[in-house]
Image: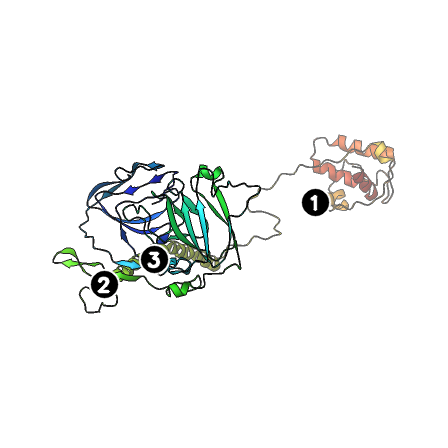
Amino acid sequence: LFSSIDVAISPMLAGCQTKLLAKDGIYLHQAPRDVTRGFMGPGNRADWLISCPPGTWQLESKKKEGQALKFHCEAPLVTIVAVDRNDVACELPTFSVARPCYVVDLRQAVPTNSLNWVLGPTPFINGNVFSAGEHEHAAEISLGQVVDMEVSGVDEHPFHIHVNPFQLTEALSDSYEGYFQAGDWHDTIFTPGAAMRGRLNVDAFAGEMVVHCHFLAHEDFGMMHLINVVGQEGTHFAKAKEIDSTCYWDDEDFGEPKILQPGEIKSTCGAQACCSAGTSGADSSDDSPSSPAPVEKKASNDVNSNRMEYLLLALVWLAIPGTILVVGLSVLAKRQVVRWLHPPPRNSRYSTASPTRKPQKTTPRTAPKLTSKRAQTGDKQPLTSTRSDTPDMRINVADASQSARPSSPSRSQLALPRGTKATDAELSTIIDNSLSRDVHSSQSEKRERSMVLWGDDTLTNACQKV
């Protein structure tokens, strides 16, 4: 249970069995404790064990009859539904746990310092109001000391201290039906009575330690104080081991709980479950029918069974992706083997023709008609083009002259010896006559006749002009 409101609650569960294990996170020195109700201020925690008959039950906050309490809330808290599962509730043993040495039983220690706290009226503690700007320490305490404390006003102001819990050293004026007992540990206390006495073990941590009212509005008004803790960080109470030899520090191992009073053990009576008297650990024997060993063995078997189930479930989940991975790798391996055995044909990188490409049509080129302006330019640079797409430009002049028509004027008829250049007028006359005589001839024949009529140098110069 956790009380998180700025009032007190008195939890009780009528009709059910309730036992108390711990308060404010610290086990009782003897647990569990039978209780009928609790009393919790703001910030208090409590660990309860409950056992209810089949039915619906109400956990509610309800004060004792005829009691007048300030800052108390009465209301339903939790509805509990108990179901009959043919089980039996056996009496629990009373035990004591191994404790850290900073929470040993300080009732056996000798205090070396003392503090008195007077809470109220709001917002005063010991007649002072806390100021964030300038404040004095309420006390200065050395690490490793046991401090005796007396606090008054806890019936109207819940007392809370940081870092170190405190232990009740005397019974309260109102134990609230056994809920508060000497020896209990708290870090917050709000009681029906007006005062409490306790002890504090200042352990390990140096610096400022806060003390304040746990009503948040009162704290905001300045109901707070500081204790200055000095000394070497990590210092412990030196006589803790003398008080309790089983206590342990942070770097030490701790033992199992000690059974103070044995409880009952669940067993079988005929066809029904029942409880039989148990024995303490020192008196138990392996062949005793009431020994808890069979119960521990059954629990061990159940644990092993659960582990096998988890292992099988994990194997099933691993098998599914594993199967998918194996199938995928098999398919990839098969494809790779087929590719090695039957490699695809390689295409030549320098192939000039593609088997699927259709031959492109080329448009025949016509011989240019040179004008006198072009012919006047005396460009004598040789023609160096080697285009493979115009093979007709490399026709032998002599072969072309043999295939020329008889009507075409020859070089000898024009009295143009090889190597000589025609004049502008002669060149124009030759081209005009040649083209006009064979208007209907093919373009290739015109090109051949022009090549015959022109000289080598003249043809070269004319092509470069074009």
Q: Are marks 1 and 2 in contact (CB under 8 Å)?
A: no
Q: Is residue 291 left or right of residue 437?
A: left
Residue identified by numbered label 3: 315
Instruction: Please report the residue visible at 76 percent of the width from the left and 32 percent of the height from the top.
Output: 435
State the mark number for residue 391. Answer: 1
Residue 403 visible in the picture = yes
Residue positioned most to the left: 270
Quick one: quadrant of the N terminus?
A: top left
Q: Are marks 2 and 3 in contact (CB under 8 Å)?
A: no
- Who is closer to the viewer here, 379 or 38? 38
Residue 301 visible in the picture = no
Secondary structure under tag 3 reads helix
Q: Is residue 394 left or right of residue 457?
A: left
State the mark number for residue 292. Answer: 2
State the mark number for residue 63. Answer: none
Quick one: quadrant of the C terminus?
A: top right
Number of residues whose C-alpha sits closer than 10 Å to that of mark 1, classed few (under 14), some (14–19) or many (20 or more): few
Number of residues whose C-alpha sits closer than 10 Å to that of mark 3, classed few (under 14), some (14–19) or many (20 or more): few
Q: Earlier in the sequence, mark 3 or mark 1?
A: 3
